[in-house]
Amino acid sequence: MNINLSNFFLVGFFFYLIFFISKEIKFFNKILVDKEFKKPQGFHNSPIVRSGGFLIFLTTIFLFILLERTNAEITLLYLVSINFFLGFFDDTKILSNPKLRFLIFLIANLFLIILFNIKINKFDFILFDYLNDNYFLFSIFLSLCAIFFVINGANLIDGFNGLLAIHAIIILTILYYLANKFNLYHILNILFYILIILAFFLILNFPKAKLFLGDGGAYYIGAVISYFTILIAREANEISPFFFAILIYYIFLEVIFSVFRKIYEKKDPFHPDSKHLHMLIYYLIEKKFNKNKRNYMTSIFVNIFYLISIIPSLFFYKNSVICQFYFLFLILLYLTSYIILRVKN
């Protein structure tokens, strides 16, 4: 794939063309429209279509048709496609049962991990490295967990205008910088174009939403983040594996902490609630901003908090010991912030 100005404009033209065409299609307006005006993170007063993920996915397919592809990019396409459709089928209510969707998710991604050898090579953690090197099923299990937590974390934090898109752009920009620094040229181009596609989407989603990602879009973004994180971690051996844990710590903790919290509160882990960290931040600032601002201001606050928290790690991303301690610090920071906000709310 070659990055050039004509391709940039072609991508943008295709994305917005599909957006305007989809607005006239009854399927999107009837099946994918969001009419939940009373949900906590909703401030829109008119129905908004959740076809953002569909547009992003179609634009990605357009890129793969238009441009030359590498093996890494073909692997990405399969991973993204399966997970996008899982989310899209939930958007369309074809697959609305969360437990069935969870089972299909596990089987489909397990198949991809084995087929394309999407595995993490090292952890710089003695026990995990020993098990990873000596037990094939354990290495597959760890890769599956990484993909699961990132994809479901992406879906969990989606809801406020720009929250997930901005978060993904921050992570993928850092991954792009690392891929360029360590000469991983075979993935630079596709990373660049995905960042551009997300930027085109963000224009329609932030600050006031004309388009939502939907579960399909959230699953797409989670698949992209998880794949490039694993790929770069595997190929750039000088970078501490714990640096990548730092990079995805927020979406990782939102899922795993939510599961244990709901079990402790005797709630169904598959059932959504409004007690996540980003929701608590929304409740904290809702009295300080009017209804037209509090939604996107939550996204700004959350992503500023995230960006400030990970910036120090960029100065010691090769030092595994420091990265390990800093990762533990971020876990404590998240838990402390959550407890304080929960008490205030």
Image: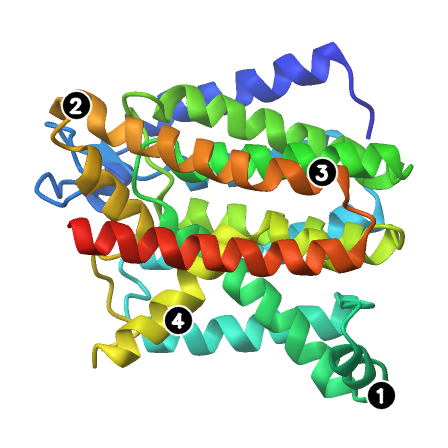
The mark nearer the N terminus, 4 or 3, is 4
Mark 2 surroundings within 10 Å by alpha-carbon count, few (fewer than 14), some (14 through 19), many (20 or more): few
SS class, disc 3: helix
Check residue 314 in the rendering and tell me which mark sits there, or answer none. Answer: 3
The mark nearer the N terminus, 2 or 3, is 2
The residue sitting at 42% across, 49% down in the picture is: 216
As measured in the structure, the alpha-carbon distance from the residue carrying label 4 to the one carrying label 2 is 37 Å
Q: Report the front residue among 30 and 102.
A: 102
**Which amino acid is tagged 3?**
Leu
The residue sitting at 85% across, 81% down in the picture is: 133
Image side of residue 110 versus residue 259, left or right: right
The residue sitting at 39% across, 37% down in the picture is: 302
As measured in the structure, the alpha-carbon distance from the residue carrying label 3 to the one carrying label 1 is 32 Å
The mark nearer the N terminus, 4 or 2, is 4
Closer to the eye: label 4 or 2: 2
As measured in the structure, the alpha-carbon distance from the residue carrying label 4 to the one carrying label 3 is 36 Å
**Which amino acid is tagged 2?**
Phe
Q: Report the front residue among 210 and 139.
A: 139
